[in-house]
Image: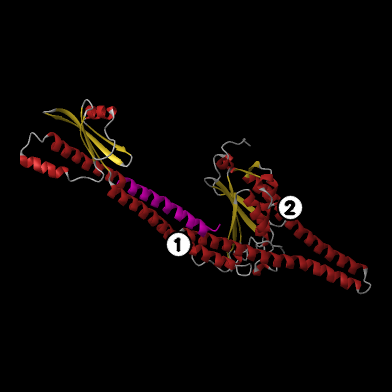
Amino acid sequence: MTIRSKLTLQFAGIMTVILVLFSLVVYYFTSLYRQDDFYKRIFTRAQVAARHILDADEVSEKVRQQNLINFYHELPHEAIRIYRTNGELIFSKGKGDIGNSSTRLKQVIERGSLEYEQGVRQVVGIYLQDNQGEFVVFSSSVDAYSLRKLQHLKIILIVGFLGSMAVVLVAGWVFAKQAMRPFTKVVSEVEKISANDLHLRLSNAQGKDEVSNLAQTFNKMLDRLELAFEMQSTFVSNASHELRTPLTAMIGELEVALMKPRETDEYQRVLQSTLEDARLLTELSNGLLQIAQASIDPAKIKLNYLRFDELVWMAREQTLKRQPNARIDIDFANFPEDEDRLVVRGNEALLLIAVVNVLENAIKFSPNGQVAIGQIEVQDHEVLLRVQDRGLGISEEDLKHVFVPFFRAENVRNITGHGIGLPLTERILKLHKGSISVYSEISKGTEVTIMLRQAYATIPTYPKL
């Protein structure tokens, strides 16, 4: 069932309940008013009958004539009975068995008056004292006219209800269509968006209603998808280039060497060149493997408590072993009095790879002296490492893609590298709920900041190191 049909049925259901309750209330109170009003008229007729029969010997001729006139203003199907308290019937007018029960007589005598229904007939009994004794007067009638009007009211309410329901169904269908129109528009616009049209956005995203919130959320998702597709495209393009370059060089060297016999030295040169290209491919493969390992489920990674400063010094030593001519200066911006604030929780091997990558990048892009400056800073709940170089810098446009695997800025194409270090570092830090940020200016250098949460900020207690 469509939402439009559900809305129509729900709207019709609510209106049905309202109309039924309204009709019942109108009919009930109309019937109650009719009954009470007719009881008052019958009560008046009982008093008129009592004055006409019992007071005839006590009043003047003029009053007696007026009582007679009043008495003959009968109600429809009227019946009157006057009894003595011992049950003796002294006056009877009209057809119908009313008040001939001793129980009814006793009730009237005890209460002074009594109202009850006998079929469609309404009966009123009143107790009177006269100079001739004590009497009970029963007067009854059938409110035929009002009952017919009540029956007509019932028919009107039923027909009105059925007619109203027809109108409600039509109005509900139109209302549901109008209510669903923004969603229909969203669906039609979404259907136009494909992998080749990710630049398109939903138009109804400027308001503050639920549909606008949905459109805004969907547009944000499209922003992420477009960025992901762009990164994927860049990754495939750069990865293909990085992998194809050493393979092309190897194939070219081998084809040239096989064209004709060569001297031993020439073969050694070709093999040495091929070996270097093979090592380059191995580094690329290892980088891809490390990125894959850094993308696994965080729950599967073994975490331990580590001193962040010790981790940085270990990374410095490893980097210097690979590049002995480099210089790396590490200092503290604000060494904490409580050394436990330097404790982080993570996987030592992965975090070591992340820090080494940042240090090697800083050395690689630092001119001449290959100097990198690392600064450890402790904040309220985080510990940071800021690594600076005085290299070529990165343009603002290229900064958007520094975490895309195999991406390399245009101004560093002549420097050996694969564009794997920063993307791998970012994924490792995400696994540890940390972050990495890059700030750079052309010709002034680059600053990379690594942030990890202090262990005490995430876990109340941990073992002292």
**Residue 385 horizontal/vertical position (percent):** 60, 51
Q: Nearer the viewer, mark 2 or mark 1?
A: 1
In this rendering, would 39 be left or right of 64? right
Question: How many numbered discs sit on the rendered protein?
Answer: 2
Q: Label 1's element?
A: helix
Q: Can you name the residue that lies furthest to the top here?
A: 86
Does label 2 or label 1 sit earlier along the sequence? Answer: 1
Residue at image point 68% right, 64% down: 235
* 22 magenta-colored: yes
Can you tell which quarter of the image residue 226 is in?
bottom right
User: Could you say which is closer to the camera, residue 155 or residue 375?
Assistant: 155
Does residue 74 appear in the picture of this structure?
Answer: yes
Q: If the image is split into quadrants, where does the C terminus sit? A: top right
- Assign the magenta stretch its main secondary structure: helix
Indicate left or right for 162 with 370 as reference: left
| Disc 2 target residue | 321
Residue at the spot 79% in from the left edge and 59% down from the top edge = 282
Q: What element carries label 2?
A: helix
454 to 111, vertically: above or below = below
**Mark pair 2, 1: CA separation:** 82 Å
Amino acid type indicated by mark 1: Val
Residue designated by label 1:
170
Residue stretch rendered in magenta on the structure: 1-29
Q: Position of residue 4 (x, y in %)?
A: 51, 59
Q: Which amino acid does label 2 sit on?
A: Lys
How many residues crowd mark 1 within 10 Å: few (<14), some (14–19), many (20+)? some
